[in-house]
Amino acid sequence: ILLDYIRKTRIQMQKKQVMRMNRWELLQHTLLMLSFLALVVTGFALRFSDSWWAELLFGRTGGYPLRNLIHRVSAVVLVLTSLMHVVYLRGKRGQQFIKDIFPSFSDLRQFKQMIFFNLGFTKERPLFDRFTFVEKFEYWALIWGVLIMSVTGLMLWFDNFFVSFLPKGVLDVALIIHYFEAWLATLSILIWHLYSAVFNPDVYPMNPSWITGKMPWDQYQHEHPNDKDQIDVE
């Protein structure tokens, strides 16, 4: 099964491609993906330290120092990646990116059209530009999530400092927010993002842009037919 999946993915990569992310964007995505995965695994391993999978990964004893280290290093990588993204947004391509991904009233109209299309009330699929309303929602939800997790994570990391001038109840609330935001982000990736990038029948076996920065031209034309500015085709 794995060999078949790899073969079909290779076929996807051999088709005519369109650049979805350049090297700088791909680096940001890769660092974000790896740091996020490490944070999820180590964070929930800390929360559910008695679970079989946490003991399998980190051992029954002595796991806390290693888990704490990986979690905090990953948090630093996530924050640095976010700062890299801020620098990227100041460039020409970054400014165009923020313009393209900024929400607009047309997203509401396309959301309504997509609901009607999926319910079978219309045969016309919305004609998306560079980003769909789903991708825009994911991006801004990511921005919000990183801000929330960074602030609450910093408070929990340096709790001795913050407790010197904040009531302990504030840190307790920060812990609750950090925990449930982690659940929200994890479920969003597992259910929403993986479906869009992997399990959606229109993109299966996957959208390979997370590996190469490119995706098949026919797939891109199907998903973003109104993007007239995309000319980097190979």
Image (cartoon, rainbow, N blue to C red):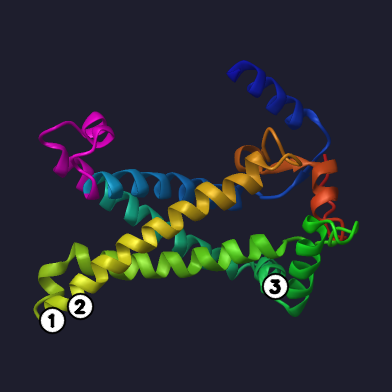
Pick the residue in front: 128 or 13: 128
Residue depicted at 62% across the width and 46% down the height: 195
Alpha-carbon distance for marks 2 and 1?
6 Å
Q: Quadrant of residue 18?
A: top right
Which image quarter is the C terminus in?
top right
What range is drawn magenta here? Answer: 47-68
Residue 51 on the magenta segment: yes
Q: Are marks 1 and 3 in contact (CB under 8 Å)?
A: no
Give the residue at mark 1. 167
Q: Give residue 228's mark.
A: none
Few, some or many residues within 10 Å of mark 1 (<14, 14–19, 20+)? few
Few, some or many residues within 10 Å of mark 2 (<14, 14–19, 20+)? some
| Left or right position of 234 against 190 | right
Residue depicted at 29% across the width and 50% down the height: 43
What is the secondary structure assignment of the residue under circle 3?
Answer: helix
Above-or-below relation of 44 to 208: below
Q: Are marks 2 and 1 in contact (CB under 8 Å)?
A: yes
Q: Give residue 99's mark.
A: 3
Above-or-below relation of 167 to 67: below
Alpha-carbon distance for marks 3 and 2?
37 Å
Please provide percent x and percent y for residue 116.
Answer: 80, 63
Q: Which amino acid lies under the numbered mark 2 shown in the image of this protein?
A: Val
Residue 80 on the magenta segment: no
Q: Specify which label sits upstream in the sequence, 1 or 3.
A: 3
What is the secondary structure assignment of the residue under circle 2?
Answer: helix
Q: Specify which label sits upstream in the sequence, 3 or 2.
A: 3
Q: Which amino acid lies under the numbered mark 1 shown in the image of this protein?
A: Pro
Please provide percent x and percent y for residue 30.
Answer: 51, 45
